Amino acid sequence: MSEGGFVVKRSERTFNCGPTDQALEQSINREAKSQGGVIGYTLRKGALVRWLLTRHITGEYAERFKEMCTPTKSKNTHEELGHARVTKDQNDVKVIKEYIKEQCQDPFDLESVATSLVNITSG
């Protein structure tokens, strides 16, 4: 904490850090409240102690098993860098370039430079 570790990063994607208390609620505490959790053990002290001492290990097993069973896309690629988005952006650039060529005056064309101030979109 003294080095600025106030957030938890639970996946490789960007911009997904969360507060430590929220990460605990979404992982260890959620597993504790689910089936096989602490409910029911509270009446037997020995069983509760064993559950508390091993819960972090069984929780880790459960998380790893979920990761193995859940198909995911590449963890390191931001959605804005996907093939569909890149293609759309390239097409948008082409449309803008065509519009400028057809509808606007080229400010770098020395042959058609106006002698007075000219708006490049209206002429």
Image: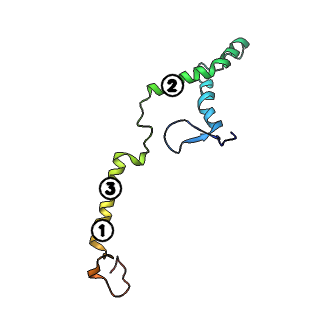
Quarter of the image for residue 69 reads top left
Tell me, for residue 99, which label it has, or none: 1
Tell me, for residue 90, which label it has, or none: 3
Q: Residue at x 63, y 18 (%)?
A: 54
Which residue is at the far bottom?
115
Secondary structure under the numbered disc 3 in the rendered image: helix
Q: Position of residue 9 (x, y in %)?
A: 56, 38
Query: Circle 2 sits on which residue?
Result: 64
Is tag 1's residue or tag 2's residue first in the polypeptide sequence?
A: 2
Is tag 2's residue or tag 3's residue first in the polypeptide sequence?
A: 2
The foreground one among 73 and 40 is: 73
> Which color scheme does this rendered protein use?
rainbow
Q: Between marks 1 and 2, how big is the CA–CA gap? A: 52 Å
Is tag 1's residue or tag 3's residue first in the polypeptide sequence?
A: 3
Question: From the viewer's perspective, is residue 44 above or below residue 83?
Answer: above
Q: Would you say 122 lies left or right of 54 here? A: left
The foreground one among 118 and 122 is: 118
